[in-house]
Image (spheres, rainbow, N blue to C red):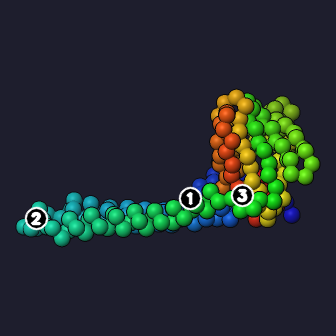
Amino acid sequence: KLFLEISTWKNLMLQDSASPLMEHLSYFHDHTLMVLVIITVLVSQLLISLLFNKFSHRFLLEGQMIEIIWTILPTLTLIFIAIPSLRLIYILDEINNPMITIKTIGHQWYWSYEYSDFKNIEFDSYMIPTNELNLFNFRLLDVDNRIVIPFESQIRMLITAADVIHSWTIPSLGVKIDATPGRLNQISFSSNRTGLF
C-alpha cells in the first residue's frame, strides 16, 4: 500500500510523521504547546482577576516572597522546555552508520542526485511544468525523476549548491537542510513507512 503524504490547505497541525525524528519533533511540539497553554491560562486568569478586583493589599509592593516565586517559576518553566529541546538537538545531529549516502546538489530550478555507494548513479530532478501535468500530478511539487530511498534504513545525505542557497525539505520526515554554495552539509534520516513524500 502506498501512502501519499502532502499538506493541504485545511491542515492545522503537523503532517503525520514518517520517521522517528519527526515523531520526536511532534512530541516536543505538543509538550511545548501544553506548557504555553498552561502559562497563557494562568496569566489570563491573573489579569482578569486583577481587572475586576477593587481590593488592594497593603504589603503588595514590599513582597520579597512573591518576587522570589515569580523569578523561580519562569526559570523552572524554561528548564522544563530546554532539557527536551537540547536532547532533541543532539538526536537530530547524530549520524548512525548510514546504509546509503546520497549526494544532493541544488541548482536553480532543479536538483542533482548522486548515488555512489553501489553503482555510480546520477540524475537530475526537474519540476514538471504546469502545462505538462497529468491529473495525478501535484502542481509545483511533482518532478520528472523522484529520489528513491529504502525505508527502515539509515540514510546520509550530503548536500551542497552550485549557485545560490537552496533548501531541501521533507516535512513528514522531519528533514530540512540548507544547500549552500562552497559548503557541504550533511543530515541523517530514516523512513518508517513506504510512500510518496
Read off the residue under disc 1.
89
Quadrant location of residue 21?
Answer: bottom right
Q: Is residue 131 left or right of residue 32?
A: right
Q: Residue flagged by tag 1: what amino acid is it? A: Ile
Q: Position of residue 132 (x, y in %)?
A: 86, 33
Q: Secondary structure at mark 1?
A: helix
Q: Residue at x 84, y 43 (%)?
A: 114
Q: Position of residue 34 (x, y in %)?
A: 47, 66
Q: Residue flagged by tag 3: what amino acid is it? A: Phe
Q: Is residue 172 above or below residue 182?
A: below
Q: Is residue 15 above or below residue 132?
A: below
> In whole angstroms, how far apart are the C-alphas of marks 1 and 3?
14 Å
Q: Return the residue found at the far left.
A: 58
Q: Position of residue 134 (x, y in %)?
A: 87, 40
Q: Residue at x 86, y 47 (%)?
A: 116
Q: Are marks 1 and 3 in contact (CB under 8 Å)?
A: no
Q: Is residue 174 visible?
A: yes
Which disc number belongs to residue 189?
A: 3
> In whole angstroms, how far apart are the C-alphas of marks 2 and 1?
42 Å
Among numbered discs 2 and 1, the one appearing first in the sequence: 2
Q: Are marks 3 and 2 in contact (CB under 8 Å)?
A: no
Which disc number belongs to residue 62?
A: 2
Q: Secondary structure at mark 2?
A: helix
As rendered, which of 159 and 19 lies closer to the eye? 159
Among numbered discs 3 and 2, the one appearing first in the sequence: 2
> In whole angstroms, how far apart are the C-alphas of marks 3 and 2?
55 Å
Q: Residue flagged by tag 2: what amino acid is it? A: Glu
Q: Secondary structure at mark 3?
A: strand
Q: Residue at x 71, y 39 (%)?
A: 160
Q: Is residue 79 above or below residue 166?
A: below
Q: Is residue 173 visible?
A: no
Which disc number belongs to residue 169?
A: none
